Amino acid sequence: MVFSNNDEGLINKKLPKELLLRIFSFLDIVTLCRCAQISKAWNILALDGSNWQRIDLFNFQTDVEGRVVENISKRCGGFLRKLSLRGCIGVGDSSLKTFAQNCRNIEHLNLNGCTKITDSTCYSLSRFCAKLKHLDLTSCVSITNSSLKGISEGCRNLEYLNLSWCDQITKDGIEALVRGCRGLKALLLRGCTQLEDEALKHIQNYCHELVSLNLQSCPRITDEGVVQICRGCHRLQALCLSGCSNLTDTSLTALALNCPRLQILEAARCSHLTDAGFTLLARNCHDLEKMDLEECVLITDSTLIQLSIHCPNLQALRGRERDRELETLMREKHQSAASCTPPTGDVPATKSLSHCELITDDGILHLSNSSCGHERLQVLELDNCLLITDVALEHLEHCRGLERLELYDCQQVTRAGIKRMRAQLPHVKVHAYFAPVTPPTAVGGSGHRLCRCCVIL
């Protein structure tokens, strides 16, 4: 019997408290809570602050009330280094003020989706949490420029900041932020629709260590802003410009000439970009790994040829705006830059050419024959590439690492072509759609005949 009536179990007698605490430090939140219910001795061990240095409530319980956060902060105190309250919509400013006062050594704080918080929370963090390095305020829609001013004054060690969908932020807030937080390595501004080129000028002036920048769906950004960023942020490795529809090859030229370390470029829906810009980019940015060219409708096989020749590490031309994946990649780029080590997560070798309607079988031939095609390509997205035929599938048989192929609305691709390719690459998952054929009108029929789908609808 492990436990005796006097609550002094055998394991408690044989092992010193320090060793028991070390064992408990490997347990997750759920297991710690269960252990706390075993006995008084284990309750003390399980709830010791040293075991609660990293807490993520997202996979545990998101409908927490503010008092839970307050109790956690009192329990953990200075031990707590990392806390994720992602999706905890019930947590507000008052609770986070108590948290900031008690957990002054916090370094990593995720408030993604905590929609109740306002500038007051950022004031509290600024006042009490000087060691903060990583802050995620995604979708905290009440955050304004005042928050950024407060953060810049009190959290000068900040390296990662996510302000996605905080649409009250303007250039004035960005200026205040970067003046104080000059060590920023990752800045995510997705959906900050009021930002203009002048905001990027401020980033250029102060954030020379910047590695990752996300400007997705910032429609007011033009070539002028991107050129400024490139001139001041030469260490840039990951850049998202998807949805910045005003950009032209001028932006690609600036990247090519100033950012040789670029590895990730997202340019979905930048419909003015052409082969000329991507050719210059490919010839200068040889470390490119991942690209999203969805709806870059002016590019042709020439872009694929240049990327195949000059970018042997290319792992992605991917679409559909995989925001979470991009944020993960940007976070890894930031972390690897800070630690001088490569990212721990594997980046899927992918390419997206969705809606690039001028791409032909010849472009796929060059891609499949390149070293990146042979060795790295795992996912290829060709939906709505109307000139692609079964010949392209024959070329892709050389891509032995291919795992997934998107062929939606590739009207010249046939079931037979897919079947032949899968005979050579049986592990490949092919996603395709073949529209039902409308039956011919019956001779002498009295009415218009509908296809089976229309009948169902």
Image (tube, grey):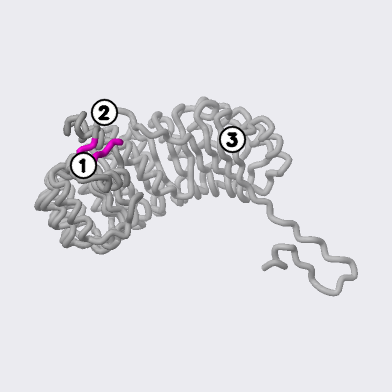
Residue sitting at 33 percent across and 54 percent down? 61
Disc 1 on helix, strand or loop?
loop
Q: Position of residue 213 (x, y in %)?
A: 31, 44
- The residue to which callout 2 is attached is 340
Residue sitting at 20 percent across and 51 percent down? 72
The residue at the far bottom in this view is: 446
| Bounds of the magenta segment | 1-9
Q: Quadrant of residue 426?
A: top right
Residue type of the residue flagged with mark 2:
Cys
In this view, the residue in front, 318 or 389, is: 318
Residue sitting at 68 percent across and 51 percent down? 434
Q: Position of residue 192 (x, y in %)?
A: 30, 57
Classify 10 Å Cα crowding around label 2: few (below 14), some (14-19), many (20 and above): few
Q: Earlier in the sequence, mark 3 or mark 1?
A: 1
Q: Nearer the viewer, mark 3 or mark 1?
A: 1
- The residue to which callout 3 is attached is 364
The residue at the far right in this view is: 444
The residue at the far front in this view is: 5
Q: Position of residue 137 (x, y in %)?
A: 26, 54
Q: Nearer the viewer, mark 1 or mark 2?
A: 1
- The residue to which callout 1 is attached is 7
